[in-house]
Amino acid sequence: MSTTVTDDTAARAIEIRREIHRHPELGFEEHNTQAIVERELSALGIEHRRVAATGVVGVVRGALPGHVSGLRADMDALPINEDSGEACSSQVAGKMHACGHDAHTAMLLGAARELQRTRDTLHGSVVLLFQPAEEGPGGALPMIEAGAMDDPKIEAVAMLHVDSRLATGTIGITPGPVNAAADEFHLTIRGKGGHGAAPHKAIDAIPCAAATVLALQNIAARETDPLSTIVVTIGTIDGGYRNNVIADIVKMSGTVRTQDPALREGVEAKLRRIVDGVAAAYGAQTSLEMLYGYPPVVNDPALSAAFASYAQEEVGLPVSAPPPTMGGEDFAYFAQRAPGLMMRLGIYNEARGSVHAGHSPQFRLDEEAIPTGIRTLVAFARAVGDGSVPLA
């Protein structure tokens, strides 16, 4: 079984990654990135179609019978001003590939090149899922609803995400929950405005908001099993007019991250009880809107164990099992519909300045990891196709 990545493929993937990095595009704006993907697939002779506005689905059909795997890469950037110092830094003000999606797309194109080059020995088919809008509002569900997993029907699906926690070239494979549900809430506190010199004639929304921020931390600190995982974060607060005016309204927004579905289900009731209770103590009124986002990513335990063993013993890849994170990922929807595997690709390299976490303006990517990423994707597709990794 060939999982070799040629020098030409690695060099081309790095070139594509830099091209995408210079021209970052936000969710459902990835028209240039889509065109790059289509250009490369057409040059390789790989059939492809557009889905979900700016998404692309390609299919590599092996010459030998076998199973169908799916490989997914996200394509969108973030609304961040780049401060990385990279030679290929963003040429678009206020937009940056600060999470490695440029590399994800380039590595999947590299894998497509290798799979197409060796398709005479490839079992089954490989569906290439180039997904828009992972950072929001979410492109996985629109792709799935457009039939991206159905023709041909994907039997197991995988993705790679760069990870600055792991040394360059290390592959992280962890069974079970690996990412959290990403839910958000918007809270409005209404009091009664007045003059700052006569607070007794008003209902000040600002101290009520301050007390609410502190009280909400009890959900994690006192209402959740310490061995469970939950994050409650207030991200924005907006209220007040000037120094001598008592605010009649404060608006806040935040996020809740959980990995346990039962814990997630009970969070909204706790939020409402706390914010209403604090508001009543201050004589204020509240309104709370809960917006449910991506579910947790849950790696199929059997697939995780089988491919980790295969990658290490048959392919010779360095494999570790990093702890889960509380970040969100809409790959979760793909993994709900077929056995799924979200893998990590280490990029930590102090010498290259690849030390910053995703979503940082200083984020840099060690391109030495790219050949390992391509090799991992090829290995997954081949192992699923020929049955080296058994499917349930």
Image (cartoon, rainbow, N blue to C red):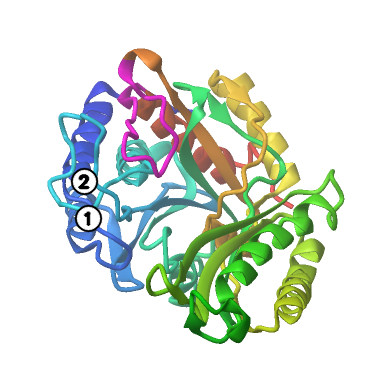
Given contact means CB atoms under 8 Å apart, are the residues at marks 1 and 2 in contact?
Answer: yes
24 vs 261: above or below:
above
Residue 186 seen in the current view = no
The amino acid pointed to by label 2 is Ile
Residue 5 found in image quarter: top left
Point out residue 321 in the picture as x, y percentages from the top left corner: 66, 29
Residue 142 shows which numbered tag?
Answer: none
Is residue 209 toward the left or the right of residue 131 in the image?
A: right
- For the residue pair 363 and 120, the one nearer the viewer reads as 363
The number of numbered badges drawn on the structure is 2
The residue labelled by disc 2 is 20
Q: Is residue 180 visible?
A: yes
Could you tell me residue 318's position as x and y percent? 56, 19
The residue beneath circle 1 is 33
Residue 166: within the magenta?
no
* Amino acid at circle 1: Thr
Q: Position of residue 98 (x, y in %)?
A: 34, 43
Q: Tell me which residue sits at (51%, 69%) in the image.
A: 150
At mark 1, the secondary structure is helix
- Which residue shows up at 36% across the image and 41% down it? 100
**Left or right of 221, for residue 299:** left
The answer to which of marks 1 and 2 sits earlier in the sequence is 2
User: Can residue 363 be found in the magenta stretch?
Assistant: yes
User: In the displayed image of the protein, which residue is found farthest to the top?
Assistant: 351
In the image: residue 207, left or right of residue 48:
right
Question: What's the residue at 50%, 66% (across, down)?
Answer: 149
- Taking 155 as reference, is 344 above or below it? above
Few, some or many C-alpha atoms within 10 Å of disc 1 (few <14, some 14-19, many ≥20)?
many
Bounds of the magenta span? 352-368
